[in-house]
Amino acid sequence: MFELLVEMFSLKAMVRAGVAGLMVSLCAAVLGVCLVLKRYSMIGDGLSHVGFGALAIASAMQLAPMAVTLPVVVLSAFLLLRLSSRGKLKGDALIAMISTGALAIGIIAISLSNGTTSDIKSYLFGSILTTSKGDMWLSVALTVVVLSLFAIFYRKIFSVTFDETFARATGEKVERYNMLLAFLTALTIVLGMRVMGAMLISSLVVFPALTAMRVCKSYKNVMLCALAVSVVCFFSGLCFSYILEIPTGASVVVTNILAFLVFWGIGKVRKA
Amino acid sequence: MALITCDNVSFAYEGRTVLKDLSLTIERGEYLCIVGENGSGKSTLIKGLLGLLNPSAGKITYEKGFLNTAIGYLPQKTEAQKDFPASVWEVVSSGCHDLRLFTTKKQQEKIHAQMELLGITGLKKRSFADLSGGQQQRVLLARALCATQTMLLLDEPVAGLDPLVTREMYQIISMLHREQNLTVVMISHDIQAALHHGDRILHLSHGESYLGTVEEYLKSPLGMRFAGGDDHV
Ligand SMILES: Nc1ncnc2c1ncn2[C@@H]1O[C@H](COP(=O)(O)OP(=O)(O)OP(=O)(O)O)[C@@H](O)[C@H]1O
Ligand SMILES: [Mg+2]
Protein backbone atom coordinates (compact mmCIF):
# COMPACT_ATOMS: atom_id res chain seq x y z
CA MET A 1 0.00 0.00 0.00
CA PHE A 2 2.69 2.42 1.08
CA GLU A 3 4.90 1.50 -1.86
CA LEU A 4 2.01 2.10 -4.15
CA LEU A 5 1.54 5.59 -2.77
CA VAL A 6 5.24 6.34 -3.17
CA GLU A 7 5.13 5.08 -6.73
CA MET A 8 2.01 7.10 -7.46
CA PHE A 9 3.31 10.38 -6.13
CA SER A 10 6.72 10.03 -7.67
CA LEU A 11 4.95 11.00 -10.86
CA LYS A 12 4.95 14.78 -11.24
CA ALA A 13 1.56 14.76 -12.94
CA MET A 14 0.10 12.84 -10.02
CA VAL A 15 1.41 15.36 -7.49
CA ARG A 16 -0.07 18.24 -9.47
CA ALA A 17 -3.34 16.37 -9.77
CA GLY A 18 -3.30 15.67 -6.04
CA VAL A 19 -2.72 19.30 -5.09
CA ALA A 20 -5.33 20.67 -7.49
CA GLY A 21 -7.85 18.06 -6.38
CA LEU A 22 -7.21 18.73 -2.72
CA MET A 23 -7.88 22.43 -3.27
CA VAL A 24 -11.11 21.78 -5.14
CA SER A 25 -12.26 19.31 -2.49
CA LEU A 26 -11.75 21.88 0.28
CA CYS A 27 -13.65 24.66 -1.49
CA ALA A 28 -16.43 22.41 -2.68
CA ALA A 29 -17.03 20.94 0.78
CA VAL A 30 -17.30 24.32 2.47
CA LEU A 31 -19.59 25.87 -0.13
CA GLY A 32 -21.52 22.66 -0.51
CA VAL A 33 -22.77 22.90 3.05
CA CYS A 34 -24.14 26.39 2.38
CA LEU A 35 -25.66 25.53 -0.96
CA VAL A 36 -27.33 22.37 0.24
CA LEU A 37 -28.79 24.13 3.28
CA LYS A 38 -30.01 27.02 1.18
CA ARG A 39 -31.56 24.56 -1.27
CA TYR A 40 -29.30 25.95 -3.95
CA SER A 41 -27.55 22.72 -4.94
CA MET A 42 -28.95 22.93 -8.44
CA ILE A 43 -27.32 26.30 -8.96
CA GLY A 44 -23.95 24.59 -8.70
CA ASP A 45 -25.04 22.09 -11.29
CA GLY A 46 -26.34 24.78 -13.63
CA LEU A 47 -23.13 26.77 -13.32
CA SER A 48 -20.98 23.81 -14.26
CA HIS A 49 -22.88 23.49 -17.53
CA VAL A 50 -22.47 27.18 -18.20
CA GLY A 51 -18.77 26.64 -17.51
CA PHE A 52 -18.68 23.90 -20.11
CA GLY A 53 -20.28 26.15 -22.70
CA ALA A 54 -17.88 28.99 -21.96
CA LEU A 55 -14.86 26.68 -22.05
CA ALA A 56 -15.91 25.26 -25.40
CA ILE A 57 -16.39 28.70 -26.91
CA ALA A 58 -13.08 29.91 -25.50
CA SER A 59 -11.20 27.01 -27.04
CA ALA A 60 -13.08 27.36 -30.33
CA MET A 61 -12.03 30.99 -30.54
CA GLN A 62 -8.59 30.19 -29.21
CA LEU A 63 -8.89 32.42 -26.18
CA ALA A 64 -7.40 31.72 -22.77
CA PRO A 65 -9.88 29.30 -21.18
CA MET A 66 -9.79 30.70 -17.63
CA ALA A 67 -10.06 34.32 -18.73
CA VAL A 68 -13.33 33.56 -20.50
CA THR A 69 -14.85 30.94 -18.23
CA LEU A 70 -14.36 32.68 -14.92
CA PRO A 71 -16.23 35.93 -15.67
CA VAL A 72 -18.99 34.13 -17.57
CA VAL A 73 -19.63 31.74 -14.71
CA VAL A 74 -19.49 34.48 -12.08
CA LEU A 75 -21.99 36.57 -14.04
CA SER A 76 -24.30 33.61 -14.50
CA ALA A 77 -24.13 32.91 -10.79
CA PHE A 78 -25.33 36.42 -9.98
CA LEU A 79 -28.01 36.17 -12.62
CA LEU A 80 -29.30 32.82 -11.39
CA LEU A 81 -29.42 34.09 -7.83
CA ARG A 82 -31.29 37.22 -8.86
CA LEU A 83 -33.85 35.46 -10.98
CA SER A 84 -34.51 32.62 -8.59
CA SER A 85 -34.86 34.92 -5.58
CA ARG A 86 -37.33 37.14 -7.41
CA GLY A 87 -39.39 34.08 -8.18
CA LYS A 88 -40.20 35.23 -11.70
CA LEU A 89 -39.39 31.82 -13.07
CA LYS A 90 -39.39 28.68 -11.03
CA GLY A 91 -35.80 28.18 -9.91
CA ASP A 92 -35.36 24.59 -11.00
CA ALA A 93 -36.97 25.10 -14.41
CA LEU A 94 -34.80 28.15 -15.01
CA ILE A 95 -31.67 26.22 -14.16
CA ALA A 96 -32.66 23.36 -16.43
CA MET A 97 -33.11 25.84 -19.27
CA ILE A 98 -29.76 27.48 -18.72
CA SER A 99 -27.88 24.19 -18.26
CA THR A 100 -29.13 22.53 -21.37
CA GLY A 101 -28.83 25.74 -23.36
CA ALA A 102 -25.19 26.20 -22.38
CA LEU A 103 -24.46 22.55 -23.05
CA ALA A 104 -25.93 22.78 -26.56
CA ILE A 105 -24.00 25.94 -27.38
CA GLY A 106 -20.79 24.37 -26.13
CA ILE A 107 -21.23 21.28 -28.26
CA ILE A 108 -21.94 23.38 -31.35
CA ALA A 109 -18.87 25.53 -30.68
CA ILE A 110 -16.67 22.46 -30.44
CA SER A 111 -18.02 20.86 -33.59
CA LEU A 112 -17.74 24.09 -35.62
CA SER A 113 -14.14 24.53 -34.57
CA ASN A 114 -13.35 20.95 -35.66
CA GLY A 115 -12.70 19.91 -32.11
CA THR A 116 -12.52 16.19 -31.48
CA THR A 117 -14.70 14.09 -29.27
CA SER A 118 -11.77 13.74 -26.92
CA ASP A 119 -11.94 17.50 -26.29
CA ILE A 120 -15.59 17.20 -25.43
CA LYS A 121 -14.85 14.27 -23.21
CA SER A 122 -12.15 16.05 -21.27
CA TYR A 123 -14.38 19.05 -20.66
CA LEU A 124 -17.31 16.94 -19.63
CA PHE A 125 -15.53 14.41 -17.49
CA GLY A 126 -12.34 16.18 -16.46
CA SER A 127 -8.71 15.57 -17.20
CA ILE A 128 -6.97 15.89 -13.91
CA LEU A 129 -3.75 14.28 -15.08
CA THR A 130 -3.13 17.07 -17.55
CA THR A 131 -3.10 19.68 -14.78
CA SER A 132 -0.23 22.03 -15.56
CA LYS A 133 1.98 23.76 -13.05
CA GLY A 134 0.15 27.02 -13.74
CA ASP A 135 -3.24 25.38 -13.18
CA MET A 136 -2.01 23.95 -9.93
CA TRP A 137 -0.86 27.31 -8.57
CA LEU A 138 -4.00 28.99 -9.79
CA SER A 139 -6.05 26.47 -7.89
CA VAL A 140 -4.02 27.10 -4.75
CA ALA A 141 -4.50 30.86 -5.09
CA LEU A 142 -8.24 30.62 -5.71
CA THR A 143 -8.64 28.28 -2.77
CA VAL A 144 -6.87 30.70 -0.47
CA VAL A 145 -9.28 33.40 -1.63
CA VAL A 146 -12.37 31.22 -1.21
CA LEU A 147 -11.46 29.84 2.19
CA SER A 148 -10.32 33.11 3.69
CA LEU A 149 -13.40 35.02 2.52
CA PHE A 150 -15.48 32.22 3.90
CA ALA A 151 -13.70 32.23 7.24
CA ILE A 152 -14.07 36.00 7.60
CA PHE A 153 -17.81 35.90 6.97
CA TYR A 154 -18.50 32.48 8.47
CA ARG A 155 -20.89 33.71 11.18
CA LYS A 156 -22.79 36.02 8.87
CA ILE A 157 -23.13 33.30 6.32
CA PHE A 158 -24.55 31.07 9.04
CA SER A 159 -27.17 33.57 10.13
CA VAL A 160 -28.17 34.38 6.58
CA THR A 161 -28.45 30.68 5.75
CA PHE A 162 -30.28 29.73 8.92
CA ASP A 163 -32.93 32.42 8.82
CA GLU A 164 -32.72 34.99 6.07
CA THR A 165 -35.78 36.93 7.22
CA PHE A 166 -34.42 37.42 10.71
CA ALA A 167 -31.08 38.53 9.34
CA ARG A 168 -32.77 41.02 7.04
CA ALA A 169 -35.08 42.24 9.81
CA THR A 170 -32.20 42.96 12.14
CA GLY A 171 -30.36 44.98 9.58
CA GLU A 172 -27.92 42.59 7.91
CA LYS A 173 -27.07 43.23 4.30
CA VAL A 174 -28.42 39.88 3.17
CA GLU A 175 -28.01 40.49 -0.56
CA ARG A 176 -24.34 41.09 -0.05
CA TYR A 177 -23.80 37.70 1.55
CA ASN A 178 -25.87 35.94 -1.06
CA MET A 179 -23.74 37.58 -3.74
CA LEU A 180 -20.61 36.53 -1.91
CA LEU A 181 -21.86 32.97 -1.81
CA ALA A 182 -22.68 33.04 -5.51
CA PHE A 183 -19.24 34.44 -6.29
CA LEU A 184 -17.41 31.82 -4.25
CA THR A 185 -19.52 29.07 -5.79
CA ALA A 186 -18.65 30.28 -9.27
CA LEU A 187 -14.93 30.25 -8.44
CA THR A 188 -15.18 26.74 -7.06
CA ILE A 189 -17.08 25.41 -10.04
CA VAL A 190 -14.58 26.82 -12.53
CA LEU A 191 -11.75 25.45 -10.46
CA GLY A 192 -13.33 22.04 -10.20
CA MET A 193 -14.27 21.58 -13.84
CA ARG A 194 -10.71 20.74 -14.76
CA VAL A 195 -10.49 18.08 -12.11
CA MET A 196 -13.94 16.58 -12.10
CA GLY A 197 -15.38 17.70 -15.39
CA ALA A 198 -18.52 19.75 -15.93
CA MET A 199 -20.77 16.73 -15.47
CA LEU A 200 -19.38 15.59 -12.16
CA ILE A 201 -18.25 18.69 -10.28
CA SER A 202 -21.58 19.26 -8.59
CA SER A 203 -21.32 15.87 -6.91
CA LEU A 204 -18.23 17.16 -5.14
CA VAL A 205 -20.36 20.05 -3.90
CA VAL A 206 -23.37 18.11 -2.62
CA PHE A 207 -22.00 14.78 -1.42
CA PRO A 208 -19.68 15.79 1.44
CA ALA A 209 -22.33 18.13 2.87
CA LEU A 210 -25.07 15.52 2.75
CA THR A 211 -22.74 12.88 4.14
CA ALA A 212 -21.71 15.07 7.07
CA MET A 213 -25.33 15.96 7.81
CA ARG A 214 -26.13 12.29 8.42
CA VAL A 215 -24.19 12.32 11.68
CA CYS A 216 -23.35 15.90 12.71
CA LYS A 217 -25.89 18.12 14.39
CA SER A 218 -24.17 21.50 14.58
CA TYR A 219 -23.20 23.76 11.73
CA LYS A 220 -19.56 23.86 12.74
CA ASN A 221 -19.28 20.10 12.99
CA VAL A 222 -21.02 19.62 9.66
CA MET A 223 -18.49 22.01 8.12
CA LEU A 224 -15.46 20.24 9.59
CA CYS A 225 -16.81 16.79 8.86
CA ALA A 226 -17.62 17.72 5.26
CA LEU A 227 -14.07 18.99 4.79
CA ALA A 228 -12.61 15.76 6.12
CA VAL A 229 -14.95 13.55 4.09
CA SER A 230 -14.26 15.51 0.95
CA VAL A 231 -10.49 15.25 1.25
CA VAL A 232 -10.47 11.59 2.21
CA CYS A 233 -12.85 10.69 -0.60
CA PHE A 234 -10.83 12.61 -3.12
CA PHE A 235 -7.57 10.88 -2.25
CA SER A 236 -9.03 7.42 -2.07
CA GLY A 237 -10.78 8.11 -5.37
CA LEU A 238 -7.51 9.21 -6.90
CA CYS A 239 -5.77 6.05 -5.68
CA PHE A 240 -8.51 3.80 -7.02
CA SER A 241 -8.40 5.50 -10.36
CA TYR A 242 -4.63 4.93 -10.49
CA ILE A 243 -4.83 1.29 -9.49
CA LEU A 244 -7.83 0.34 -11.57
CA GLU A 245 -7.03 2.72 -14.42
CA ILE A 246 -10.46 4.31 -14.39
CA PRO A 247 -11.32 8.02 -14.83
CA THR A 248 -10.51 10.03 -11.71
CA GLY A 249 -13.65 12.14 -11.57
CA ALA A 250 -15.96 9.15 -11.69
CA SER A 251 -13.87 7.27 -9.19
CA VAL A 252 -14.08 10.19 -6.73
CA VAL A 253 -17.85 10.29 -7.10
CA VAL A 254 -18.05 6.58 -6.30
CA THR A 255 -15.95 6.93 -3.12
CA ASN A 256 -18.26 9.78 -2.12
CA ILE A 257 -21.27 7.56 -2.60
CA LEU A 258 -19.68 4.89 -0.44
CA ALA A 259 -18.89 7.42 2.29
CA PHE A 260 -22.48 8.65 2.15
CA LEU A 261 -23.83 5.13 2.60
CA VAL A 262 -21.52 4.47 5.53
CA PHE A 263 -22.49 7.72 7.29
CA TRP A 264 -26.13 7.13 6.55
CA GLY A 265 -25.83 3.72 8.23
CA ILE A 266 -24.10 5.26 11.24
CA GLY A 267 -26.83 7.89 11.49
CA LYS A 268 -29.55 5.23 11.40
CA VAL A 269 -27.84 3.09 14.02
CA ARG A 270 -27.40 6.08 16.32
CA LYS A 271 -31.03 7.02 16.09
CA ALA A 272 -32.25 3.52 16.83
CA MET B 1 -39.74 62.11 19.04
CA ALA B 2 -41.41 58.72 18.82
CA LEU B 3 -39.28 55.73 18.01
CA ILE B 4 -41.44 54.77 15.05
CA THR B 5 -44.18 56.84 13.43
CA CYS B 6 -46.63 55.44 10.89
CA ASP B 7 -48.51 58.03 8.89
CA ASN B 8 -51.63 56.71 7.18
CA VAL B 9 -49.84 53.60 6.02
CA SER B 10 -51.44 50.89 3.96
CA PHE B 11 -50.04 47.52 3.03
CA ALA B 12 -50.99 45.44 0.03
CA TYR B 13 -50.01 42.09 -1.43
CA GLU B 14 -50.14 42.09 -5.21
CA GLY B 15 -52.54 44.98 -5.25
CA ARG B 16 -54.85 43.53 -2.58
CA THR B 17 -54.91 45.89 0.40
CA VAL B 18 -54.81 44.09 3.74
CA LEU B 19 -54.24 47.07 6.02
CA LYS B 20 -55.54 50.55 5.33
CA ASP B 21 -54.74 54.03 6.58
CA LEU B 22 -53.16 53.14 9.86
CA SER B 23 -51.57 55.88 11.94
CA LEU B 24 -49.50 54.82 14.87
CA THR B 25 -46.64 56.09 16.99
CA ILE B 26 -44.48 53.85 19.08
CA GLU B 27 -42.81 55.63 21.96
CA ARG B 28 -39.56 54.65 23.56
CA GLY B 29 -40.11 52.32 26.50
CA GLU B 30 -43.75 51.44 25.87
CA TYR B 31 -45.38 48.03 25.70
CA LEU B 32 -47.78 47.86 22.78
CA CYS B 33 -49.97 44.82 22.21
CA ILE B 34 -51.50 44.12 18.83
CA VAL B 35 -54.63 42.00 18.77
CA GLY B 36 -57.14 41.08 16.09
CA GLU B 37 -58.50 38.10 14.24
CA ASN B 38 -56.59 35.87 11.85
CA GLY B 39 -55.72 37.57 8.63
CA SER B 40 -56.31 41.08 9.91
CA GLY B 41 -52.77 42.12 9.00
CA LYS B 42 -50.92 41.97 12.32
CA SER B 43 -47.88 40.13 10.99
CA THR B 44 -47.98 42.32 7.92
CA LEU B 45 -47.74 45.44 10.08
CA ILE B 46 -44.77 44.02 11.99
CA LYS B 47 -43.02 43.20 8.73
CA GLY B 48 -43.68 46.74 7.62
CA LEU B 49 -42.16 48.14 10.82
CA LEU B 50 -39.11 45.97 10.21
CA GLY B 51 -38.75 47.25 6.68
CA LEU B 52 -39.29 43.78 5.20
CA LEU B 53 -42.31 45.11 3.36
CA ASN B 54 -42.83 48.54 1.85
CA PRO B 55 -46.11 50.31 2.55
CA SER B 56 -48.30 50.72 -0.52
CA ALA B 57 -49.30 54.16 0.73
CA GLY B 58 -48.28 56.43 3.60
CA LYS B 59 -44.95 56.67 5.29
CA ILE B 60 -43.08 55.09 8.18
CA THR B 61 -40.48 57.28 9.85
CA TYR B 62 -37.97 56.29 12.45
CA GLU B 63 -36.34 58.26 15.22
CA LYS B 64 -33.11 59.85 14.08
CA GLY B 65 -30.27 57.36 14.29
CA PHE B 66 -32.62 54.42 14.84
CA LEU B 67 -31.48 51.47 12.78
CA ASN B 68 -32.68 47.96 12.24
CA THR B 69 -29.69 46.78 14.22
CA ALA B 70 -31.52 48.02 17.32
CA ILE B 71 -34.43 45.63 16.75
CA GLY B 72 -34.86 42.11 18.02
CA TYR B 73 -37.46 40.12 16.10
CA LEU B 74 -39.30 36.94 16.94
CA PRO B 75 -41.10 35.76 13.80
CA GLN B 76 -44.44 33.98 13.89
CA LYS B 77 -42.97 31.15 11.90
CA THR B 78 -39.27 30.85 11.34
CA GLU B 79 -38.23 30.23 7.86
CA ALA B 80 -35.44 28.08 9.20
CA GLN B 81 -35.76 24.56 7.88
CA LYS B 82 -36.72 21.67 10.07
CA ASP B 83 -33.56 19.64 9.59
CA PHE B 84 -31.03 22.47 9.66
CA PRO B 85 -27.94 21.32 11.55
CA ALA B 86 -27.36 24.00 14.17
CA SER B 87 -26.68 23.86 17.88
CA VAL B 88 -28.63 26.03 20.29
CA TRP B 89 -25.50 28.05 20.94
CA GLU B 90 -25.04 28.72 17.25
CA VAL B 91 -28.62 29.87 16.85
CA VAL B 92 -28.59 32.20 19.85
CA SER B 93 -25.25 33.71 18.94
CA SER B 94 -26.39 34.36 15.37
CA GLY B 95 -28.48 37.19 16.82
CA CYS B 96 -25.36 39.17 17.74
CA HIS B 97 -24.16 41.86 15.41
CA ASP B 98 -20.53 42.27 14.36
CA LEU B 99 -19.72 38.61 14.75
CA ARG B 100 -16.32 37.50 13.58
CA LEU B 101 -15.05 33.96 13.23
CA PHE B 102 -14.45 33.85 16.97
CA THR B 103 -16.82 35.42 19.50
CA THR B 104 -15.34 38.00 21.85
CA LYS B 105 -15.49 37.68 25.61
CA LYS B 106 -18.14 40.38 25.78
CA GLN B 107 -20.34 38.69 23.18
CA GLN B 108 -20.01 35.37 24.98
CA GLU B 109 -21.12 36.96 28.22
CA LYS B 110 -24.12 38.50 26.53
CA ILE B 111 -25.10 35.23 24.90
CA HIS B 112 -24.75 33.39 28.19
CA ALA B 113 -26.80 35.98 30.02
CA GLN B 114 -29.71 35.66 27.59
CA MET B 115 -29.60 31.87 27.70
CA GLU B 116 -29.57 31.96 31.48
CA LEU B 117 -32.52 34.36 31.48
CA LEU B 118 -34.61 32.06 29.34
CA GLY B 119 -33.52 28.92 31.11
CA ILE B 120 -31.93 27.25 28.14
CA THR B 121 -28.32 27.12 29.32
CA GLY B 122 -28.63 23.36 29.71
CA LEU B 123 -29.60 23.00 26.05
CA LYS B 124 -26.52 24.85 24.79
CA LYS B 125 -25.01 21.93 22.89
CA ARG B 126 -28.29 20.35 21.77
CA SER B 127 -29.38 20.40 18.19
CA PHE B 128 -31.97 23.12 17.55
CA ALA B 129 -33.96 20.84 15.28
CA ASP B 130 -34.42 18.23 18.02
CA LEU B 131 -35.97 20.61 20.56
CA SER B 132 -39.66 20.84 21.38
CA GLY B 133 -41.66 23.76 19.99
CA GLY B 134 -41.58 25.64 23.29
CA GLN B 135 -37.85 25.17 23.71
CA GLN B 136 -37.28 26.39 20.17
CA GLN B 137 -39.39 29.45 20.85
CA ARG B 138 -37.25 30.32 23.85
CA VAL B 139 -34.06 29.85 21.85
CA LEU B 140 -35.41 32.23 19.22
CA LEU B 141 -36.36 34.78 21.87
CA ALA B 142 -32.82 34.57 23.24
CA ARG B 143 -31.54 35.19 19.73
CA ALA B 144 -33.78 38.24 19.41
CA LEU B 145 -32.48 39.54 22.74
CA CYS B 146 -28.91 39.21 21.52
CA ALA B 147 -29.78 41.47 18.61
CA THR B 148 -31.19 44.40 20.57
CA GLN B 149 -30.95 46.81 23.44
CA THR B 150 -33.81 48.99 22.30
CA MET B 151 -36.78 47.25 20.83
CA LEU B 152 -38.42 43.83 20.62
CA LEU B 153 -40.97 42.91 17.99
CA LEU B 154 -42.69 39.68 18.95
CA ASP B 155 -45.09 37.92 16.63
CA GLU B 156 -47.14 35.51 18.74
CA PRO B 157 -44.35 34.59 21.13
CA VAL B 158 -46.43 32.05 23.04
CA ALA B 159 -47.99 30.19 20.13
CA GLY B 160 -47.80 26.50 20.90
CA LEU B 161 -46.49 26.82 24.45
CA ASP B 162 -48.04 25.08 27.43
CA PRO B 163 -49.93 27.27 29.96
CA LEU B 164 -47.14 27.23 32.50
CA VAL B 165 -44.44 28.20 30.01
CA THR B 166 -46.81 30.76 28.49
CA ARG B 167 -47.13 32.52 31.84
CA GLU B 168 -43.38 32.37 32.31
CA MET B 169 -42.81 33.79 28.84
CA TYR B 170 -45.12 36.75 29.50
CA GLN B 171 -43.37 37.38 32.78
CA ILE B 172 -39.96 37.33 31.14
CA ILE B 173 -41.12 39.79 28.49
CA SER B 174 -42.63 42.11 31.12
CA MET B 175 -39.46 41.88 33.15
CA LEU B 176 -37.34 42.79 30.12
CA HIS B 177 -39.66 45.68 29.45
CA ARG B 178 -39.38 46.99 33.00
CA GLU B 179 -35.78 46.27 33.87
CA GLN B 180 -33.98 46.77 30.59
CA ASN B 181 -36.35 49.48 29.46
CA LEU B 182 -37.00 47.68 26.19
CA THR B 183 -39.72 48.91 23.90
CA VAL B 184 -41.96 45.92 23.24
CA VAL B 185 -44.42 45.39 20.42
CA MET B 186 -46.21 42.07 20.81
CA ILE B 187 -48.84 40.34 18.76
CA SER B 188 -51.00 37.99 20.75
CA HIS B 189 -54.33 36.23 20.46
CA ASP B 190 -54.42 36.04 24.23
CA ILE B 191 -56.50 39.16 24.88
CA GLN B 192 -56.39 38.80 28.66
CA ALA B 193 -52.61 38.69 28.67
CA ALA B 194 -52.48 41.66 26.33
CA LEU B 195 -54.74 43.65 28.68
CA HIS B 196 -52.74 42.56 31.68
CA HIS B 197 -49.23 43.27 30.40
CA GLY B 198 -49.59 45.94 27.74
CA ASP B 199 -49.66 49.72 28.12
CA ARG B 200 -51.59 50.24 24.93
CA ILE B 201 -53.63 48.05 22.64
CA LEU B 202 -53.82 48.20 18.87
CA HIS B 203 -56.79 46.25 17.63
CA LEU B 204 -56.82 45.44 13.94
CA SER B 205 -60.03 44.23 12.44
CA HIS B 206 -61.03 44.00 8.81
CA GLY B 207 -61.38 47.59 7.74
CA GLU B 208 -61.33 49.20 11.18
CA SER B 209 -58.61 49.61 13.74
CA TYR B 210 -58.52 50.90 17.27
CA LEU B 211 -55.59 52.29 19.20
CA GLY B 212 -55.67 53.35 22.82
CA THR B 213 -54.61 52.60 26.37
CA VAL B 214 -55.92 49.46 27.99
CA GLU B 215 -58.60 51.41 29.89
CA GLU B 216 -59.77 53.27 26.83
CA TYR B 217 -59.83 50.08 24.82
CA LEU B 218 -62.06 48.29 27.33
CA LYS B 219 -64.61 51.09 27.09
CA SER B 220 -64.61 51.17 23.29
CA PRO B 221 -67.24 49.25 21.32
CA LEU B 222 -64.57 47.08 19.72
CA GLY B 223 -63.00 46.30 23.08
CA MET B 224 -66.41 45.51 24.60
CA ARG B 225 -67.11 43.00 21.89
CA PHE B 226 -63.69 41.43 21.76
CA ALA B 227 -62.66 41.42 25.40
CA GLY B 228 -66.12 41.14 26.87
CA GLY B 229 -65.97 44.60 28.48
CA ASP B 230 -64.86 45.58 31.99
CA ASP B 231 -66.64 42.91 33.93
CA HIS B 232 -64.52 40.20 32.39
CA VAL B 233 -61.17 41.39 33.72
N1 LIG C 1 -46.85 36.80 1.38
C1 LIG C 1 -48.15 37.06 1.18
N2 LIG C 1 -48.67 37.12 -0.05
C2 LIG C 1 -49.96 37.39 -0.27
N3 LIG C 1 -50.85 37.62 0.71
C3 LIG C 1 -50.43 37.57 1.98
C4 LIG C 1 -49.05 37.28 2.28
N4 LIG C 1 -48.90 37.29 3.63
C5 LIG C 1 -50.12 37.57 4.13
N5 LIG C 1 -51.03 37.73 3.15
C6 LIG C 1 -52.45 38.07 3.34
O1 LIG C 1 -52.54 39.26 4.09
C7 LIG C 1 -53.55 39.18 5.06
C8 LIG C 1 -52.97 39.50 6.43
O2 LIG C 1 -52.01 38.52 6.79
P1 LIG C 1 -51.21 38.55 8.13
O3 LIG C 1 -50.24 37.45 8.11
O4 LIG C 1 -50.68 39.92 8.35
O5 LIG C 1 -52.38 38.26 9.19
P2 LIG C 1 -52.25 38.12 10.77
O6 LIG C 1 -53.08 39.19 11.35
O7 LIG C 1 -50.85 38.03 11.20
O8 LIG C 1 -53.00 36.73 10.99
P3 LIG C 1 -52.67 35.55 12.04
O9 LIG C 1 -53.39 35.88 13.29
O10 LIG C 1 -53.26 34.35 11.39
O11 LIG C 1 -51.20 35.45 12.19
C9 LIG C 1 -54.14 37.79 4.95
O12 LIG C 1 -55.35 37.89 4.27
C10 LIG C 1 -53.16 37.00 4.14
O13 LIG C 1 -53.82 36.10 3.32
MG1 LIG D 1 -49.62 36.64 12.03
Image (cartoon, rainbow, N blue to C red):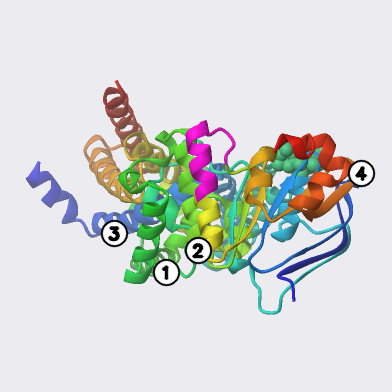
Other-residue count near label 4 (Cα within 10 Å), few / some / many at <14 / 14–19 / ≥20: few
- Tell me: B30 left or right of A48: right
- Closer to the chain start, of discs 3 and 1, is 3
Query: Label for residue A19?
Result: 3
Q: Which amino acid type is shown beneath numbered disc 3?
A: Val
Residue A263, quarter of the rendered image: top left
Q: Secondary structure at mark 4?
A: loop
| Residue to which mark 4 is pinned | B207
Q: Quadrant of ligand 1?
A: top right
| Residue to which mark 2 is pinned | B179
Chain for disc number 4: B
**Real-space Cα separation, disc 1 to disc 4, in angstroms:** 55 Å
Foreground: disc 4 or disc 2: 2
Q: Which amino acid type is shown beneath numbered disc 1?
A: Val
In what quadrant of the picture does the C terminus of chain A appear? top left
In what quadrant of the picture does the N terminus of chain A appear? top left
Tell me the residue at 89%/41% (across/down). Answer: B221
Whether ligand 1 has any atom under 8 Å from the Cβ at mark 4 is answered as no
